[in-house]
Image (cartoon, grey):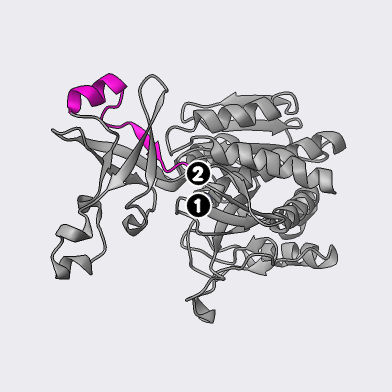
Amino acid sequence: MEEEYRALTHLLGELSEAFGVSGFEEEVRGIIQSRVQSIADEIHVDPLGNLHAVMGRESPFTLLLDAHMDEVGFLVKAIEEDGFLRLVPVGGWDPRLLPGQTVWVRARNGRGYTGVVGSVPPHVQETEDRKKPFDWKDLFVDVGARDPQEVARMGIRLGSPAVIPQPFLHLTEGSFLGKALDNRAGCAILIRLLESLRRASVEGMRVVAVFSTGEEVGFRGATVAARRWRPQMALILEGTIATDTPGILPHQRVAALGRGPVLTTADRTLIVPERLLEKILHLAETKRIPHQIKTPMVGGTDGGVIHTSSEGVLTAVVAVPCRYIHSPRCLLRREDLLHTEQLVESIVREAPRIYREVGT
Ligand SMILES: [Zn+2]
């Protein structure tokens, strides 16, 4: 088991540190492709950058597994006279988290430059202004350049993508800190699932794993992937928000660390058919896999566009609970990863039966 743990966290660390702002997922895709290339029966990369890994032959039953590769980040929005950069967010960010952070801007030549998010220091602010949180218009990035010419020589231009870097860290035994765990956790689980399916072979279905792009900006990759494969059933693997932290009232708790995979009943984009959810709950109970139900109507996933594609797709969402998602640093627990992995694998193996029983 110890070795199992190490393999999973090593993979997650590599994925977490890779750069993958929506629309710029190449590095993440490269890591995934090198892992699944020799396992899958077919591999495709489509014009939107989705990586499709297909297991098994054409079948009347196609199961689509989706994990988005992209992460929230920024694009350079303006380059000012004195060499400062302004950023525009890609995906959901809280600007209050940003002052004082370092950012890593990817330049045209693929090189990266570190900068710091600056703001008006409290020493020169009026008393009233000091009480107000910073907004995007108050924040800028200082990469050390003197003027726009120097910025241009660095290869930074309007539209250059940026992230807040964070090395993947082991905290206490089994707790990890890293960036983009929403949704590199889902990517790691999906890669390992494909490895395990290869050993067991796929029966009675075609499994299409889609590592999708552009989720954080509106489920773009998943939209075309669903159209391409016209699946009968879909399972979305995600990282979702754990709110078991100080200052959050019991009724605001969306999910908690240590309680296993988080099951969606309904979010802003999808209501999971109750009979499908019941099958998944039953599987988790009979296999004694800890699990929890997410507070309804919070967030949205690729499932939103997949379930309404073609003639309608039976769709469920299973997520790893992560604290502080959409911030520069997320925290998760190893046991949640492993329990999510177990539940996902059980669902996939039982998918043809589940579909037969609840499908139409
Ligand atoms: Zn996500």
**Which amino acid, by three-letter code, is at mark 2?**
Gln
Where residue 172 appears, x then y in whole percent? 67, 57
Q: Residue at x 85, y 35 (%)?
A: 199
Mark before the other along the chain sequence, 1 or 2: 2
Q: Residue at x 60, y 47 (%)?
A: 169
| Gap in angstroms between the C-alphas marked 1 and 2 | 7 Å
Q: Would residue 251 be counted in the magenta stretch?
A: no
Mark number displayed over residue 100 = none
Q: Residue at x 72, y 56 (%)?
A: 173
Figure check: 24 above or below 90: above
Q: Would residue 163 be counted in the magenta stretch?
A: yes
Question: Can residue 206 be seen in the rendering of this structure?
Answer: no
Q: Which residue is mark 2?
A: 166
Figure check: 39 above or below 254: above
Describe the element under mark 2 as helix, strand or loop. Answer: loop
Q: Which residue is mark 1?
A: 329
Where residue 149 appears, x then y in whole percent? 19, 22
Describe the element under mark 1 as helix, strand or loop. Answer: loop
